Structures are given as C-alpha cells and as structure tokens.
Amino acid sequence: MNGKSHHGQPAHAYLPAIGFRRVSRFYKPEKAALFDVSFDVLPGEFVYISGSSGAGKSTALRLMYGAEGPDTGAVLFGGHDLRNLHPTAVALLRRRLGVVFQDYRLVPELTAAQNIALPLEVDGVRHAEISVRVEEMLEAVGLPGIGKELASSLSGGEQQRVAIARALVRHPEILLADEPTGNLDVYNANFVLDLLEEKAAAGTTVVLATHDRMLMAARPHRVMAFERGRLLGANHSQAEAIAAPCVPRAG
Amino acid sequence: MLWTKINHITRRAGRGFLRRPALYLVSVFTLAAAFLSFAATVTAAANLDHLLSRWLGSAEITVYLSNDVIQERMGLLASAVSDISGVAAVKTRTGREAREDLALGLGDQGDMARTLPETAFPASLDISLTQAAARDQKLRNELAQRLRRLDMVSSVETYDDWFERLSALTLVSRMAAWGLGLVALAVAILVVAAVIRTGVASRAKEIEVLRLVGATERYVRLPFLLEGILQGLIAMSLALLSLRGLTSYVEGVTGQVLPLLGSGALVRLPAIACLVLLLGSCFAGFIGALVSVGALRRA
Ligand SMILES: Nc1ncnc2c1ncn2[C@@H]1O[C@H](COP(=O)(O)OP(=O)(O)OP(=O)(O)O)[C@@H](O)[C@H]1O
Ligand SMILES: [Mg+2]
C-alpha cells in the first residue's frame, strides 16, 4: 500500500484486526441499522462497542464475523475484504474468531461439553485433547462438572457462560462478545470480565458490545459509541463516552 | 489430522443415528425389503440362466426306435450316428432300461412302473451334441431330419419347444430383475432423501453454529452423506443375508426336484455380484443424501 488506502483513510503501519470502511447496513430502506461507519480495531486491543438498545451494536458484530455483508462500504478482517473471499476462505477466517452471541446460540440438544467442543472439532483437534480443554474452559467460566448437562437444561446465566467457554476454547485471535454479561449477577460478571481482560493481556483482540455504563466505567478501555446506527467517535476516551447523553431510541 | 477429522465426522453421523433410531430403522428395513426383492429376482434369473446353459451343455436329441428293433441293430445304428459331425456321444437305452430309469425317478412309487410291460417303453438312442452343435439350432434341425428318415426310427425329440420356453422365462426374469433394480434404486434414493431431510431440519441449529465457528460446507455436509451411505450399506447387507437364508430354504423345499431338473443346487450370487450390489446401495444412499443436503442453504 502507498501513503493512503484506497478508501481515503491514512494507511496504518500495522494491519487492523478489524476495519470498517464507510459501512452502511439497511434492513429497511428508510432506516439504517448502521450508517457510514468507519473504524479500526487494532490487534491486541480491548474495545467496547457501546450504545443503547437498537443502536446497531449486534449488527456491527454480525458484520465482523461475516454472518451478513454490508450494503455499502467494506468490512476488513485481518486486511481481507470479506466480500471478495470464497466461502471456504471466510470459514477459515472464522476459525481465528471466538464469538459470544447475544442469544448464546447453544445447540439445545447437545450437552454443554459437546457445545464447547464444536469449534475444536471444526479445527480438527484430537478427541482426547478436546475433553481436556473443554473441562478446563468449564472451570475457567466457573462451571466445573456441568459438561454432561444438556444445554437446554441450563439456566440463562449458565448458558451464557457455556457460550463464553465455547468462544474462548480455541484461544481465538479475536473475541467478539455481544453483551456477554447481560444475564450474569455482579459476581459472575466480574469473574467473566476478569477472564476476558486476562485474554486481552495475553494478546487476544477483544470487542465487547454492551450498553452497561457501569461496566465501562469500572473497566476502562477504548469506547466506540453508537447511536441509531452512527458511530459518534471511534476514539472516545471512556470518560467522554460515559459523559455522552443517553439518546432514547427513536420510534 | 485427517484421521481426527474423519473421526469427528463419523461421530457426528453416529449422533444423527442415535438421536432418531426409530426413523433410521424404518428406513433401513424399507430399503432392505426393496433390495431383497431385487436381489432375489437377480438370483432367480441367474438360476434360470444356469439351467438353460446346463441344458445347452448337455443338449440331447432322443431318438425313439420302433418296437421291433433288435439289440444288435441298435448297436450298429449307434456307432453310425456317432460318426455324424456334431454328435459327441451316443448312448443306447433298451425298453427295460427306460422302465428302470422311470422307476428310479419315481422313488417310492417306482414299483408301480415295474409292473408295466417292457414294450410300453420304446428303446431309444440318447445323443449328446457337441457344444457348437448344441447352440446351432439349424444344425440340430438338420440332424433331426436326417435321423427321422431312418426306417428304424419312430420319432425324434429335440426338446426345442422346452428350450424356447425356458429361454423366454429367462428373458422375462432378467427384465424383471432390471425393472426391480430400478425400482429399488428409486425407493432407496427417495427414502434416504426423506430421512436425511428431516435430519437436516432437526439439526438446523447445529448446522448454523458449525458454520459460525468456521466449518466448511464439506464439513457440514459430509456426516449427512455418510449417514445416507450407511443406510444403503446396512440395508443391502441385511438383504443379502436374508437372501442367503431364503436360498437355503428354497433349496430345502425343492431338494427332491432339483436333481431332476439337472442341477444339484441353486446358484447363489457370486461374491463379485454381492460387492457390486453393496457398492450400488452405497451409491443410492449417497445420491439420496446428496439430494437433501444439496438443498441446504449456504450460510
Ligand atoms: N434481521 C433484522 N431484520 C430487520 N431489522 C433488524 C435486523 N437486525 C437488526 N435490525 C434492526 O437494526 C437496528 C439495530 O439492531 P441491533 O440488533 O444491531 O441493535 P443493538 O445495538 O444490538 O441492540 P440491543 O442492545 O438491544 O441488542 C434495530 O433497529 C433493529 O430493529
Ligand atoms: Mg444487540
């Protein structure tokens, strides 16, 4: 690349882990879920995506793991534009990710352990090693010994922690977490956030979507504040983000 | 790594099987029934074919002699006939011998035949033909004509109409085998496709998650294809085992008749045919699964 990228933004000396370039996403023509959003997430960074309900946080994450594509603009993942990639290449990129979905997406008819094992099976990890790593992860999220329970029989908070375990079990380069503490009590929320910060300190890029100002205040990291699909400023300090008025959701 | 992948894919296929065993059993037995009717027809055709070729191989012309022919002249006639080209061997049979043959054939009721007068059984020459002559209908007819012109001869039986009937039956059974083969193939594909379709539907969530954690389409689809192949394979194995039992049973029931038909035991499907059938059943299961998995929407 020369001095400027073809999107008209200064090229960085490093490749962003994730880059949005003037991304818009319209589910309905008159209302943008995301509008003209550009930002970079740097490798090893811990960033919040904040905003009130309906601001576009989950949409931004879905674009990051390629569940859907932008209507305009480009989403870059490790320097690759997802749109230009063959589905198999997208699948391979997803193996570098761990995703905690807002609705967990556990497979209800599989056990907790089988759910957590899915990414490792996709990665082709040996079965003996899988059981060890799954049990380690269950312990790390504070659920030792529940591996044999069916996912559908777990409480909401337990399901959320199984989802976190599944996202972390392959030691991903990038962790995308959508309200990962939404269903947890303060004690367990802190337990999980400690774990995520530990991962970030070890080099994992963490993108955490939340509307929880208390959380962001307690654990300061860069905040990308969204409001009705627009990014207010990618380089907010957490102080500015917290000070920003809470915009009621339109409509 | 490859082995590990195969292991995971097999486990996933097994999980599908264990989750809905009843459905899979129904599918496997339906397929097995279709395969069995096909394989049984193939076996029947093979047996008719075998019978036909044995008849061809031992093809005979029986020359019935007039009652007044004496033993000496029979011998002369036999040696003269054996010089004719196309004739492999000639056996003479007196009226007494013919009566004894029948008596032996009747078994327990044999004594009844022995009370009949010897003269009720005409003496005959049993002429076996060479392979070439046996398969050449024109040559056989010419030979029969020549024999009929001899003045000691009362009639000549070439068994042509029997031969034609058996040929026709063999043809019909072969066509039936082909037809049933196509039906079995269609049944297998449709049944497997239906079962796999419900499997895909009931595992929609798992498929979605697999894609989200980076599974390739191949990884998502392979277990279903494997399930389809296994259904076909298990069903055909069942069908072939049942056919073995069925063949032995038929042999037991018809044990008395088979030797009279000139064949000691029923022909069983050779190993190579069984292998082809097993491969065919895998293919049918694969295609059935492919139909359903092909409908899987890409993520
Ligand atoms: N699949 C969809 N079809 C139609 N509209 C959608 C869809 N997904 C999201 N939206 C709309 O896009 C907007 C942003 O939704 P999004 O889920 O990204 O919000 P969010 O910031 O994650 O909210 P929350 O905090 O409630 O999870 C909302 O107005 C929502 O109604
Ligand atoms: Mg959301």
Image (cartoon, rainbow, N blue to C red):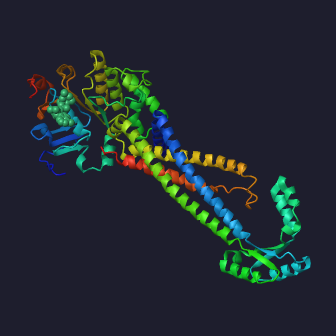
Q: Position of residue B285 (x, y in %)?
A: 47, 49
Q: Residue B124 in the image: state x and y as whole percent.
A: 82, 73
**x%, y% of residue A127?**
48, 35
Residue B234, horizontal then vertical, whole percent? 54, 44
Q: Is residue A49 visible?
A: no
Residue drawn at (10%, 25%), measured in percent from left and top? Answer: A240
On screen, residue B173 above or below B149: above
Marker count (numbered)? 0
Residue A19 occupies quadrant = top left
Q: Regarding ligand 1, which quadrant of the image does it lie in?
A: top left
> Which quarter of the rendered picture does the C terminus of chain A lie within?
top left
Residue B236 visible, this angle: yes
Residue B102, quarter of the rendered image: bottom right
Q: Which residue is pictured at 71% across the width and 51% down the height?
A: B251
Q: Is residue A240 left or right of residue A196?
A: left
Give me the residue at 25% from left, 41% from top: A66
The answer to whether A216 appears left or right of B243 in the picture is: left
Q: Nearer the viewer, residue A22 or A55?
A: A55
Residue A170 located left or right of residue B98: left
Q: Is residue B61 above or below residue B238?
A: below
